[in-house]
Amino acid sequence: MSRWLRRTDAGRTPRLEFGADYNPEQWPRETWTRDVELMRDAGVTIVTVGVFSWARLQPAPDVWDLGWLDDVLDLLHENGIAVDLATATASPPPWMHHRHPEILAVDADGRTLWPGGRQHHRPTSPVFRRYALDLVEKMARRYGEHPALAAWHVSNELGCHDVHDHSPDAEHAFRIWLRERYGDLAALNHAWGTAFWSQHYGDWAEIRTPRRTGPGTHPNPTQQLDFARFSSDALLSHLRAERDLLRSLTPDVPVTTNFMVMGETSGMDYASWAPEIDIVSNDHYVHPGPSARDELSFSANLTGGLAGGAPWWLMEHSTSAVNWQPVNRAKRPGELARDSLTHLAHGADAICYFQWRQSAAGAEKFHSAMLPHAGSDSALFRAVRDLGATLRELAPVAGAHRVPARAAILWDWPSWWAAEQPFTPTAELRYKAEALGWYRAFLDTGVRADVVPAGSELTGYELVVAPVLHVLPAERAAELAAFAEGGGHLVTTYFSGIVDENAHAVLGGYPGALRELLGVRVEEFAPLDPGATVLLDDGSTGDLWSEPVRVVGDDVEVLAGYTGGGSDPGAADLTGVPAVTRRAIGAGGSATYVSTRLADRAPLLRRLLDAAGIVPELPGELCGRVELIRREGFRFLVNRTDTPVELAPLGEIESLAGLPTTTLPPRAVTVLRD
Ligand code: GAL
C-alpha cells in the first residue's frame, strides 16, 4: 500500500484530489461538455467513471460498445481531469440474469434476490466471475495506457447488498473454504461443537450455510461466525481475482476498491482486505443523530488505521441529503466542508462524493450531488466550489502521514459478529456503540486516540482500550498481556475475552482469556433489562450489563463499586461489589476492567489517562469542544459544537487557506502548521 495515483506519482507537487463518481451515461453528450466546464470551475481533479456502466459497455454477451467511454476519457483528459476507472463489474446487466438466472443471490430463507435494483449477484457465482473477468480484461487492455487513467476501481462497495448469500454456489464455496480452514471433518466437528444438538457431520456435503431455522432456534454459533468470515473472504476472493488480472495487464496502475467503514455496516473484515490493495479508499455517509459527527471522525480514524497511518482516499460521501433514510435532511451550513475536512484531517488525500451531477432519473434522483438539480446557481454548488478552492490551498498537507496518538482503541470485526449473535446474555449489546462511546470519551477529554484493527502492532501506544473484545484467541490474549507487562495500560470491558476463535467459551470463569491479566473473576453475567441502570459509588451510571466481579489477583485496586441504587428491580444485588478494577502489572503497566456499559466514560478515562501520564494536547478550555487531529506537520481543529469556539487559548496562530484563527465558527475546521 505504498502507491498513490499513477499520473501524479514521482516528484509531483503535492496536491489533494477532489471529485466524485461521474455517470455521463445518464446524460446526453451536450451535457458532458458543460460538466467538464463546471468541474474545472469547482476545482475537480479526479472522477470515478463507469461504476454502473456494464449494461452500456456490453449490451449483449457478444456486443461491446466502448466508444462512448473512449470519448469521456479523452474529454476528461483534455480538461486535466484524472480518471479512477471502475472495472464496471458492480452490477450485472439484465441479459446476464435473463440468460443465467443461476447468478442470482439467495437469502437466508432460500428466497431469490431478484434483479431490478443492483448488485443482485452471488459473489461466488462462477458464471458471474467469468463474465466479470472478461469485462475487466477488456477495460484493462483498452484503457491501461490511457493518459487519464490514475487508478483502477474494482467493482463498487463489494458486499453492499449481497454479502450473505445462501445460494448453491455459496454453499459449494463455503464447503471448500471450510476444508481449507479445518482440513478434516473431525476438526470441523470439534470447532463447531457439533456434539451439541445432534449436529455431528459425517460428510462435507451435509454442511450448509446457516439459513433460517425454526422459530425459537438459531444456527450453530460457530457455523454463523465461520459463515461471516467466509462471506467476507468470498468478496475478497473476487477482489483478488480482478486485482490479479489488472496487475498482470497494467502493473503500473494502482488498484483500489471502496470500503464501507461507516455506521453499522459490518459484513466485511477490512483488516484482511486492506493489505490486498494499493490505496485504501472508503465511502462514508452520515447517519443522522447526536453521535453523527463523532461517528464520522471514528470511521475516518479507523480508515486511517486500515491504511497503516498512510494517506487514503475518501471515495464517496454526500454533499448534502442522502435518499435512503426515512427522512432525508439537507446538511446544515458548514457541514459539507466540516465533514470533508474531518476526513482530510484523518488522512484522506482525495475528497470525493457520490456523485458529480444529481440524477434526473433512477433510484437516486433525490440524493444530493456536487451539482444539484438546481444547477450551478445554487448555494450547494457554491459551497462545493469554495471547498475546491480550500483544498487547492491545503495542497501542502498531501502525503502527510498521521502522527500516531499515545492511545488507541482496538477494533475487531469477528468480535462484532460474535458478540451480537443471538443466544447471548442480552440481545441489546451493540459492539459499535461501545467502541464509539470510548472514542467519544477521548474526544471529550481532548486526548487523541487512534482506532486500529485488533492485532495491530501496539508498540508506541501507552494506553489501549479494547471494548467488547469478545473473540480472543490465546495468542492475541498473550499479546495484550505482553503489552501490559511491558508498561502499557490496557482497558477492557464486559464480554471481552469470553470466547476463542471457534466461539468456544474460555473455561474457569469470566472474563475468560483476560481473567488472569485483569485479576478478577466472574461466575455469572448479570445483564440488565432494557432501560434499567446501575449506580456506581463514584457517581457514574451504567446500563445493559453488570457483573458480580470478584477480585482474585494481586495488586488489584477497585476504582468503582456497584451501589444498591440501580433501577432494575429484578437485577442481582451487587451492593459493594467491584464494578471497575485496575490491576498494576509489571514495569508500571496496568489492566483495567469495566464490567458495565458506562453512560459517560470520560470521568473514568480521565483518571486512567492521568495515571498513565497522558495529557491532552489542547489547552483545557478547548478540550471537549474541539477535536484535534494531527498529520505530520499539521494540526486540524474541528469544532464539535454548534456554537463558536474562541481560539485565544492557543495564542497567536497562523492558519492555512485563510481558515479561522481567532474564532472557530459552529461546525468549522481550521488547519495550522505544526
Ligand atoms: C453508495 C454507492 C453509490 C450510491 C451511494 C448513495 O452505497 O456506492 O453508488 O448509491 O451509496 O448514498
Image (cartoon, rainbow, N blue to C red):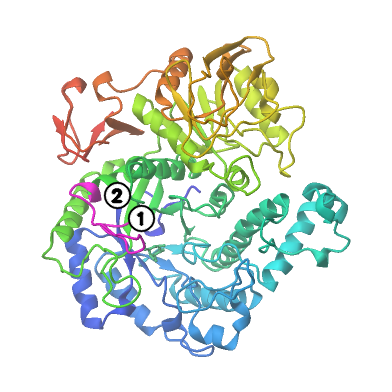
Residue 582 percent coordinates (x, y): 57, 16
| Residues in magenta, as a range | 316-336
Confirm or deny contact between disc 1 and disc 2 (CB under 8 A). Answer: yes
The quadrant where ligand 1 appears is bottom left
Q: Residue furthest front?
A: 569
The answer to which of 174 and 140 lies nearer the viewer is: 174
Secondary-structure class at tag 2 = loop
Can you say whether 170 is above or below 6 in the image? Answer: below
10 Å neighbourhood of mark 1: few (<14), some, or many (≥20)? Answer: few
Q: Please tell me the numbered disc located at residue 15.
A: 2
Kind of residue indicated by mark 2: Arg
Which residue is tagged 1?
8
Please identify, in this view, whether the residue under mark 1 or under mark 2 is nearer the observer: 2
Report the predominant secondary structure element of the magenta stretch.
loop
Q: Quadrant of the C terminus?
A: top left
Residue 90 percent coordinates (x, y): 48, 70
